[in-house]
Image: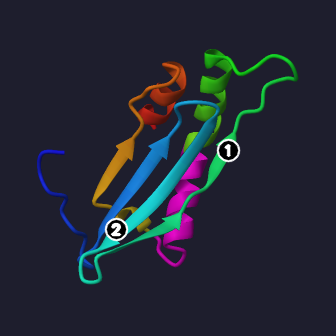
């Protein structure tokens, strides 16, 4: 990160993070309060791809799983973090996502969201 993150209107830095490097797809909302110098996890919903018994998880099927769930997880994370807001995204300072390591397809599925 080359430039400091811009705090939101409340003076807090809020990051929406998307993780999908393996068989778990998760979205978290993390808040940093500079006044108290504390971090708080506001939400962290996730879905796990479970492959058929004895098969292990494969990149293509795992990518499909993440594509099917990542948008709903983003909406759930924002709703959980800011339950009484009609536009919770206005609180965000930045969005972060997994670049790797991991299988290629699943992280790309999450980054595209």
Is 55 contained in the magenta span?
no
Is residue 8 found left or right of 85 in the rendered image? left
Alpha-carbon neighbours of circle 2 within 10 Å: few (<14), some, or many (≥20)? many
The majority secondary structure of the magenta stretch comes to helix
Residue 50 is situated, as x and y percent measured from the top left of the image, at 77, 32
Residue 111 is situated, as x and y percent measured from the top left of the image, at 42, 34
Is residue 109 found left or right of 38 in the rendered image? right
**Residue 91 numbered tag:** 2
**Residue 47 numbered tag:** 1
Alpha-carbon neighbours of circle 1 within 10 Å: few (<14), some, or many (≥20)? some
User: Residue visible at 55% across and 44% down?
Assistant: 71
Name which quarter of the figure residue 24 lies in. Answer: top right
Q: Is residue 33 above or below residue 3?
A: below
- Which label sits in the foreground, 1 or 2? 1
Residue 90 is situated, as x and y percent measured from the top left of the image, at 33, 65
Question: In the rendered structure, are the residues bearing label 1 and label 2 in contact, judged by CB atoms less than 8 Å apart?
Answer: no
Name which quarter of the figure residue 2 lies in. Answer: top left
User: Residue visible at 19% across and 58% down?
Assistant: 5
**Residue 94 numbered tag:** none
Q: Nearer the viewer, residue 75 or 44?
A: 44
Extreme-bottom residue of the structure: 35
Q: Which of 108 and 41 is in front in this view?
A: 41
Q: In this view, does 105 lie above or below 74?
A: above
Quadrant, the N terminus? top left
Query: Which element type, helix, strand or loop, lies under badge 2?
Result: helix
Extreme-right residue of the structure: 53
Is 84 contained in the magenta span?
yes
Extreme-left residue of the structure: 3
**3D distance between C-alphas at marks 1 and 2:** 24 Å
Q: Is residue 101 above or below residue 17?
A: above
For the magenta stretch, what is the residue range? 71-86
């Amino acid at each position: 990160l080359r430039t400091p993150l811009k705090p939101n209107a409340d003076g807090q830095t809020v990051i929406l993070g998307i993780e999908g490097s393996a068989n778990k797809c998760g979205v978290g909302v993390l808040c940093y309060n500079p006044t108290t110098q504390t971090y708080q996890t506001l939400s962290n919903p996730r879905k796990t791809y479970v492959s058929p018994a004895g098969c292990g998880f494969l990149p293509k099927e795992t990518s499909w799983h993440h594509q099917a769930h990542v948008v709903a997880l983003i909406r759930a994370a924002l709703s959980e973090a800011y339950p009484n807001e009609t536009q919770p995204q206005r609180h965000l300072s930045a969005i972060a996502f997994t670049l790797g390591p991991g299988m290629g397809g699943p992280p790309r599925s999450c980054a595209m969201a």
